[in-house]
Image (cartoon, helix red, strand yellow):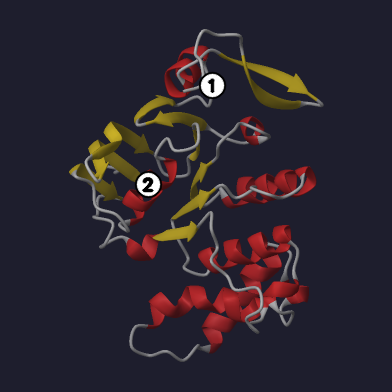
Amino acid sequence: MPVSAIELNNIFFFYNSHSILSGVNLKVEEQDFLAIIGPNGSGKTTLLKIILGILNPGQGTVRIFGKTPLEAAGLLGYVPQDTGLNKDFPISVQDVALMGRLGRRGRERRYTSEDRALVRRVLEQVGMWEFRDRPIGKLSGGQRQRVLIARALTVEPKVLLMDEPTASVDAQFQTDLYDLLKELNATITIVVVSHDMSVLSGYINSVACLNRTLYYHESGEITDEMLHAAYQCPVDLIVHGGVPHRVLRKHDHEDS
């Protein structure tokens, strides 16, 4: 019987007795392209970290292709929101991408010719091979993001998880990135966390709105009911320049 790429059952998570996630259930099928949207502080990054096994839920189960996150570590590639890269550290694009192979080396820390061939292939795939010897700190934000995607792909993942991949980059990079992700989606399950819709709606297969509880629509349609439930106030989608944007309707909520 086929198993889902990701299956979350009744996930609860608390931080200092404060509820972050409450009763989250989700199935992501293989080769799906899922967007998780929601307001700031809604638990999106926490949910990704639970899928990755970085955090343990207070209640509920997580399965990646039927395995626990620990057992499935080699199946997951991750591009975090905060890269933590020291831009002054003298490390090249190629060396950053090679870091993704460390988990495959075990106690043997030497990179093999196969590792280097794989790194070349993924850097070519993300359009960064020509910059392979350039220090990571000398790249633009969009170029660094491509390198971090390459690092995640060198894990040879079956699932790629990305947290706010287009934060602080221009509109052209957003389009180029999602074109690349759509290409990768032919063989890889992709989950992208974002705080708004931006250009996502033209690429995704399914969408979930998260604000402690998760609201899911497998067709990729973002409904008024989902947005109202997740954002706790009326929301409209408008299209400007061919790109959908989220706007708030007039409502009775006041800032607290």
The quadrant of the image that shows the N terminus is top left
Q: Which label is found at residue 222?
A: 1
Q: Tell me if residue 3 comes above or below residue 101 in the rendering.
A: above
State left or right for residue 15 relative to residue 210.
Answer: left
For the residues labelled 2 and 1, the Cα–Cα distance comes to: 22 Å
Instruction: Please identify the residue farthest to the front as the structure is shown.
Output: 256
Q: Quadrant of residue 120?
A: bottom right
Instruction: Determine if residue 112 is in view.
Output: yes
Q: Which label is found at residue 35?
A: none
Q: Secondary structure at mark 1?
A: loop
Q: Residue at x 39, y 75 (%)?
A: 103
Mark with earlier residue (2, 1) = 2
Residue 40 drawn at (x, y percent) = 50, 37
State left or right for residue 152 relative to residue 7.
Answer: right
Pick the residue in front: 56 or 159: 56
- Count neighbours of disc 2 (C-alpha within 10 A) and say few if under 14, some if 14 to 19, many if 20 or more: some
Q: Tell me if residue 235 comes above or below residue 168 in the rendering.
A: above
**In front: mark 2 or mark 1?**
2
Total numbered labels placed on residues in the image: 2
Q: Quadrant of residue 142?
A: bottom right
Q: Tell me if residue 45 comes above or below residue 149 in the rendering.
A: above
Q: Which label is found at residue 46?
A: 2
Residue 32 drawn at (x, y percent) = 48, 40
Q: Quadrant of residue 247?
A: top right
Instruction: Determine if residue 118 is in view.
Output: no
Amino acid carrying label 1: it is Ile
Amino acid carrying label 2: it is Thr
Residue 61 drawn at (x, y percent) = 20, 44
Q: Secondary structure at mark 2?
A: helix
Q: Residue at x 70, y 18 (%)?
A: 238
Q: Residue at x 50, y 19 (%)?
A: 227
Residue 27 drawn at (x, y percent) = 34, 36
